[in-house]
Amino acid sequence: MISRRNLLLGGAALTLSGCKLLDGLNSGDSMLRATLQGAENLTMTAQRFLLGDSLAPEFAEADIRQGQHPNGSTAVDSPEYLDLQAGGFANYRLQVTGLVETPLSIPYATLTAMQSRTQITRHDCVEGWSCIAKWTGVPLSMILDQAKPLLKARYVVFHCFDTIERTLAGEVTYYESIDMVDARHPQTILAWGMNGQPLPMANGAPLRLRVERQLGYKMAKYVQSIELVDSFAGLGSGRGSYWADRGYEWYAGI
């Protein structure tokens, strides 16, 4: 039987292969894009109805049989990031802005000292591979509780340090978003540790998002700041994330 997870991974891998059928996905008036968007909305609605706030599967230490394979960017070359890394991220501060009552600027030492959650989960990459690792970090809900989102806040946007694309208009750094439902899920954390050690650069130091019921590309690495918004109008091409702007699912639930 073909599971939804395998179907999604296979379909996404097909997209990565450059299949001509999907060349028009970046077009705002693409009929195929509109069809896939409708299917994605249906999937999100069905998954939310069936799963509610249930947890993604968690595993035992014995299930960690290899190092966590890094997805996406594996290094950041901006001077600001390299200076922070050289100092062990002691001067890093997570900025939380946008539709909040209380904007935040949280030092790295404070983040790592906050109540944390540790979870051993499986990372499912859009390219078709999976890997189990132990993640430790701050529940995103705790950060939101401190910032006090306004009622009109609908999405949490993650702005990242890594340059994913260089164009004539300038550098494009990675951006991702989730809605408030996933933001407050108990397994949604800002991870600063992996497999009992500080998060390595290749895996997204100093902080990366873990949102365990979605595909790996949703789990933004090198998080620089968080912004709460009521729409995606001012973010990229308006579809909610770097990859969604290029034809991938925004929700990407599994």
Image (cartoon, helix red, strand yellow):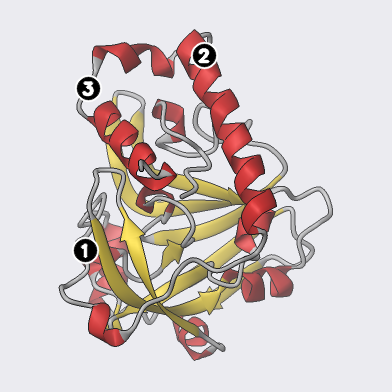
Residue visible at 44% across and 69% down?
57
Horizontal side, residue 191 vs residue 106: left or right: left
Element under label 2? loop
Residue visible at 72% across and 73% down?
145
Question: What amino acid type should be assigned to the residue bearing mark 3?
Answer: Gly
Element under label 3? loop
238 over 67 or under it: above or below: above
How many numbered badges does the structure rendering display?
Answer: 3
Residue visible at 77% across and 67% down?
148
Mark drawn on residue 28 = 2
Mark drawn on residue 202 = 1
- The CA span between labels 2 and 1 is 34 Å
- The CA span between labels 2 and 3 is 19 Å
Horizontal side, residue 3 vs residue 78: left or right: right
Mark drawn on residue 18 = 3
45 over 116 or under it: above or below: above
Element under label 1? helix
